[in-house]
Amino acid sequence: MKKIIYLFAVIVLFFVACGGDDKESSVMIWTGTNQLSEVELYEGSAAGGIKKDYSDIENQDSLQTALVRRFFSGSYNSQLFKGMYVDFNEDKVTFVDSISSRKIVSNYEFDGDSLFAIKTDGGRRFIGVGNMDSLYRVKTFSRYASPKTGKDTVGIYDGEPTLEKLLNDAGYENLGAMTNKTDTLIWFSAKYIFK
């Protein structure tokens, strides 16, 4: 009986010692929500591309959701970074990218507000934007009927490209080149937040 009491006391001490650490985990994971930018839609006219104005619609959040579902249901993945995590430990970062599922443990550096893992060859691998308390990644989704091929096309970008880049990828030199009423260019950005 003494042995059982002694064993029980050791187990209790072990759990008290392990549970006494008030240090929170530094692991950052996707928060489960994304911030969507305003959906922008340009339509062709004789005068060139004109931005569609939705300011008269009362519920802007519902409008955003409806537009994303209508135009990007097959391409926008709201849980794209569900499996990604980042953990800082002294001078190292552990990073698992949910897309490739590779685990990287390396030195890291912030360049402005962008976090990079340092590769063994000295190169850098982008992890996210922010700081050691909160990071985010941005994906931009565009859709257009390509004037070159006539096919419905979806573009997916890391970060937030300029209007000029989106127009160029859609095959337009500028907004003035969108002269056909069927010319359309629509896009939005999704910010995936990690804490």
Image: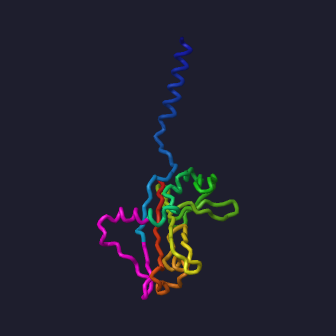
Residue drawn at (34%, 72%), measured in percent from left and top?
Answer: 54
Name the one closer to the observer, 185 or 190.
185
Task: Look at the picture and state if 143 lies above or below 90.
Answer: below
Can you give x and y, in whole percent of width and height, for residue 126 in the image? 58, 63
Tell me: 35 left or right of 169.
left
Numbered label tally: 0
Return the residue found at the far right.
121
Q: Is residue 62 magenta?
A: yes
Q: Is residue 88 magenta?
A: no
Name the one closer to the observer, 75 or 161.
75
Task: Look at the picture and state if 11 lies above or below 19.
Answer: above
Snapshot colouring: rainbow
Return the residue found at the far bottom.
47
Can you give x and y, in whole percent of width and height, for residue 45 in the image? 43, 84
Name the one closer to the observer, 156 or 123.
156
The quarter of the image holding the N terminus is top right
Tell me: 102 left or right of 190.
right
Residue drawn at (54%, 72%), measured in percent from left and top?
Answer: 152
Can you give x and y, in whole percent of width and height, for residue 35 in the image? 42, 61
| Magenta highlight range | 40-67
Residue drawn at (54%, 15%), measured in percent from left and top?
Answer: 4
Can you give x and y, in whole percent of width and height, for residue 49 in the image? 44, 82
Tell me: 51 left or right of 163.
left
Task: Look at the picture and state if 118 lies above or below 94.
Answer: below
